Amino acid sequence: MQDDNCIFCKIANGEIPSVTLYEDADFRVIFDLNPATRGHALILPKEHYEDLTVLPEELQSKVLPLAARIGRAMKEGLGAKGFNVVQNNGEAAGQTVHHFHLHIIPRYGNPDEMVLWKPGTSTPEELNKVCAEIGARLK
Ligand code: AMP
Ligand code: ZN
């Protein structure tokens, strides 16, 4: 199923041309328009799913092996020293395009490459509380 108003539906299905790194029946892998680093890629499912919570498990189980293949190829082909796999769900998490996508961001060891958060602190009491709040809803 596609969404007529979704740019990633159009790109994933070839209606809008893109430089395509990889394509199969389920996914197209393109390059981010505003790359964090050289080679920053996006894995797009061809069907429209808003985010990870509604992505079918069949596609969930395929997307991470594909990310691993791309990351390996980035290390070999681009000389990346590592790579980040980033995936935003919801505006509060920084999602700006509401069609599931996985960022693969090669890292070259430059200090201005940013995929960071500010480390906080925790206590066992707080972690037990958080664990109970989430755990009760795990299905
Ligand atoms: P997110 O913030 O996780 O929703 O990421 C959306 C990403 O899509 C951003 O990094 C944008 O730079 C990228 N983006 C938006 N439009 C396009 C486009 N037409 N082609 C390629 N990348 C895009
Ligand atoms: Zn879409």
Image (cartoon, rainbow, N blue to C red):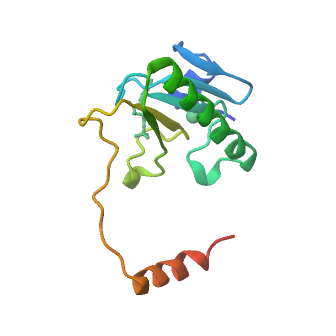
**11 or 124, which lies in front?**
124
Q: Residue at x 36, y 29 (%)?
A: 108
Picture quadrant where residue 123 is located: bottom left
Residue 93 screen position, x and y as percent:
40, 52
Picture quadrant where residue 71 is located: top right
Q: Is residue 24 left or right of residue 104?
A: right
Q: Is residue 48 left or right of residue 26?
A: left
Residue 84 screen position, x and y as percent:
45, 40
Question: Ligand 2 appears in which quadrant?
Answer: top right
Residue 66 screen position, x and y as percent:
64, 33
Q: Residue at x 61, y 80 (%)?
A: 136
The quadrant of the picture occupied by the C terminus is bottom right
Residue 113 screen position, x and y as percent:
29, 35
User: Residue 109: in sight, yes or no?
Assistant: yes
Picture quadrant where residue 122 is located: bottom left
Q: Residue at x 46, y 36 (%)?
A: 83
- As drawn, 118 above or below 66: below
Q: Residue furthest bottom?
A: 125
Q: Is residue 131 left or right of residue 80?
A: right
Q: Number of callouts in the render?
A: 0
The quadrant of the picture occupied by the N terminus is top right
- As drawn, 122 above or below 11: below
- As drawn, 48 above or below 11: below
User: Residue 16: in sight, yes or no?
Assistant: no
Q: Residue at x 47, y 84 (%)?
A: 129
Q: Residue furthest left?
A: 112
